[in-house]
């Protein structure tokens, strides 16, 4: 098996992975996301040091997920497999178990519940923070798109340009990725990112503080010739306006072009 902590395969059209991926990143998990069963199998077949923790997380339609599980079992009979399935009924759960899947969750399940199950299966405390473990999200088998790399400290644009994030910027982006609909109000961002809250009396200072932070972040992206993939919601909050689900792996460590790294 590969040395990555978790291998994630998402079947076409599932759309289930992003909140779970963001939640796992918050826990400091290392991820390799695969867009094909062949790529997943190749990664699992690679030799690793003994004792490296590993789990396979599958998301998608029942047929694609079961085929992926069967392919994984042919390569590794002992790896833990968790599946996110649409509306899993008794018949589908039985089919999943026969294909070698260890645990199933509905695709609509809250990400913290899925993460808690994953952490138990890989033998790590659920409360593990972003500073623990391997960390990082490398996504394979996809075309050019936005990349969240180096445990969320670097954003890579579709053309390869890289923007490093400060701690607050990283926390805001991860909070948006994990949020339902990938949008948050000002108050929700302040609750999720304590460092974004201004000191002293609040009043309108919170919204102004967020506006300043977003403006600085926008200038970073503009310096690389890109619009920031976060848009303002008419003064009420912010939302992602780019798809981070299809990503690519940098062949070598990227060099941030601006900002403060980890």
Image (cartoon, rainbow, N blue to C red):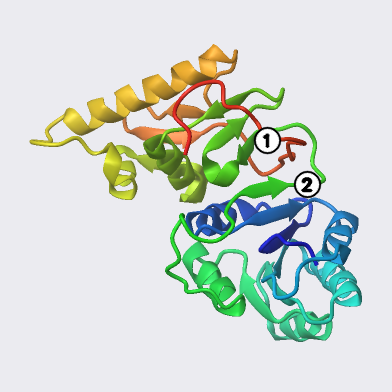
Quadrant of residue 94 within the rendered picture: bottom right
- Seen in the image, is 201 located left or right of residue 59? left
Question: Which residue appears at 78% of the width and 62% of the height?
Answer: 2
Q: Quadrant of the N terminus?
A: bottom right
Classify mark 2: residues with Cα within 10 Å, few (<14), some (14-19) or many (20+): many
Q: Tell me the residue that label 1 is attached to.
A: 253
Q: Residue at x 47, y 71 (%)?
A: 126
Residue 245, placed above or below residue 126? above
Picture residue at 65% right of the left edge, 22% below the top: 161
Residue 212 at x, y percent in the picture? 31, 22
Q: Position of residue 130 (x, y in %)?
A: 46, 55
Q: Where in the figure is residue 136, as x and y percent of width and height?
A: 60, 49
Location of residue 198 (image quadrant): top left
Give whichever of 111, 8 is nearer the camera.
8
Viewer-side label of 1, 2: 1
Please tell me in which quadrant of the rendered image residue 89 appears: bottom right
Q: Which residue is mark 2?
A: 140
Task: Locate residue 198 relative to residue 64 in the image: left or right.
Answer: left
- At mark 1, the secondary structure is loop
């Amino acid at each position: 098996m590969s040395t990555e902590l978790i291998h994630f395969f998402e079947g076409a059209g599932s759309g289930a992975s992003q909140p779970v991926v963001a939640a796992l990143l918050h826990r400091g998990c290392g991820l390799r996301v695969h867009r094909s069963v062949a790529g997943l199998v190749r990664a699992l077949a690679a030799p690793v040091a003994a004792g490296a923790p590993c789990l396979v997380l599958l998301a998608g339609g029942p047929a694609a997920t079961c085929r992926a599980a069967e392919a994984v079992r042919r390569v590794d009979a002992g790896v833990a497999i968790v599946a996110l399935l649409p509306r899993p009924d008794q018949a589908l759960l039985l089919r999943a178990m026969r294909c070698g899947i260890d645990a199933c969750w509905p695709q609509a399940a809250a990400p913290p519940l899925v993460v808690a199950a994953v952490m138990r299966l890989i033998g790590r405390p659920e409360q593990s923070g972003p500073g623990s473990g391997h960390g990082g999200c490398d996504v394979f088998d996809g075309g050019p798109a936005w990349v969240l790399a180096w445990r969320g400290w670097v954003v890579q644009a579709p053309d390869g340009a890289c923007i490093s994030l400060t701690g607050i910027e990283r926390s805001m982006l991860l909070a948006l990725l994990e949020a339902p609909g990938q949008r948050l109000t000002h108050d929700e961002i302040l609750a999720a990112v304590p460092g974004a809250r201004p000191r002293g009396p609040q009043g309108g200072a919170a919204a102004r503080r967020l506006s300043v932070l977003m403006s600085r972040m926008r200038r970073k992206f503009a310096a690389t010739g890109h619009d920031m993939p976060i848009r303002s919601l008419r003064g009420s909050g912010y939302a992602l306006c780019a798809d981070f689900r299809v990503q690519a792996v940098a062949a070598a460590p990227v060099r941030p072009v601006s900002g403060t790294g980890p």
